[in-house]
Image (spheres, grey):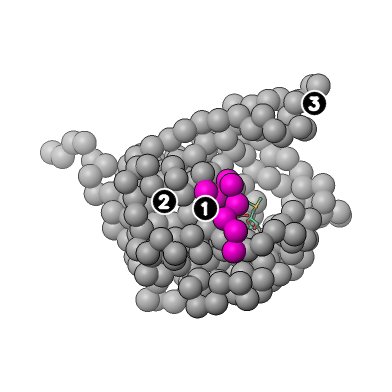
Amino acid sequence: MSQDSCYLDSEADAFYERNLRDLDPTTLRPAKRQIAEWIESAGVRPKRVLEYGCSHGDLLRHYAAAGADSAHGVEPSESAVERGRAAHGDAVKLWRGTLADNPVNADPGSRGRFDLVVVEDVLCWVSRETLFQSIANIDGALAPDGYLFLREFLPRENTRNRNHHVVGKEVYCYKPAGPHARIFTASGAYRRVAERVWLDESDDWVTEAGRNRFESRWCDSLLQKSSLSWSRER
Ligand SMILES: C[S@@+](CC[C@H](N)C(=O)[O-])C[C@H]1O[C@@H](n2cnc3c(N)ncnc32)[C@H](O)[C@@H]1O
């Protein structure tokens, strides 16, 4: 069974129950607020937002309230999607699925539609078998000149950590030293607008003796899908 199927079948719901069930979907989480502020500080005020792995959609609600015309989210957890739908009504459209396989990308009308796509701590959980389909879906949904926010781990070397909550199956958090953002910029079709690197000091397993602190180093990237990324033309 692929890692994506494992999330769809059970682990996404289990994650939601373990970590987010007690939160109110109408309240913007502090981490999401910080992301929204960082994106805004780059002058990005989106009208059509798509978030993959959006949980119960609090960030999308924030963008809808801030004046976005449409706010769509994709999330494998049925519990998160149901709670979000009940809390946000028509302001936010939540869809159950994965980055690689979801109703938004299946709709031809979504192609090139969104001027901001957010993917916060999700790419590391995607099956390596569907990683490039997932990347193609992000690119396919993003409008020309649209912005892509990625939050992801930034270890010193390619590292994968086993998800010990999933017993009897090989499910990993994949942390390429690349990081994934470089897949976009290496294509020449994206330019880097802003980047920040930070260490999660609150992560106690990293401060345990013997652990490599670089495994909890993070990178936020704001990229723009841009024809201007070519500095030379001959
Ligand atoms: C560690 S959480 C990161 C925080 C999350 N972005 C949020 O808003 O709460 C990972 C999220 O990605 C979702 N997820 C896992 N695999 C996914 C996939 N293949 N496609 C889309 N979302 C996925 C999980 O269900 C979970 O909500």
Let me know if residue 86 is in the magenta part: no
Picture quadrant of residue 174: top right
Disc 3 crowd rating (10 Å Cα; few below 14, some 14-19, many 20+) is few
Structural distance between the alpha carbons of marks 1 and 2:
8 Å
Residue wearing tag 1: 119
Label 1 CB sits under 8 Å from any ligand 1 atom: yes
* Quadrant into which the C terminus falls: top left
Residue wearing tag 3: 208
Picture quadrant of residue 82: bottom right
The reply to whether dot 1 and dot 2 touch (C-beta < 8 Å) is: yes
* Residue 90 image point, x, y percent: 50, 78
Residues in magenta, as a range: 26-33
Structural distance between the alpha carbons of marks 1 and 3:
28 Å
1 or 3: tag closer to the N-terminus: 1
- Foreground residue among 114 and 126: 114
* Residue 136 image point, x, y percent: 45, 58
The reply to whether dot 1 and dot 3 touch (C-beta < 8 Å) is: no
Instruction: Say which element carries label 3.
Output: loop
Label 3 CB sits under 8 Å from any ligand 1 atom: no
1 or 2: tag closer to the N-terminus: 1
Residue wearing tag 2: 148
Q: Tell me the tag on residue 145.
A: none
* Residue located 52% across and 36% down the image: 219
Amino acid on which the number 1 mark rests in the picture: Val
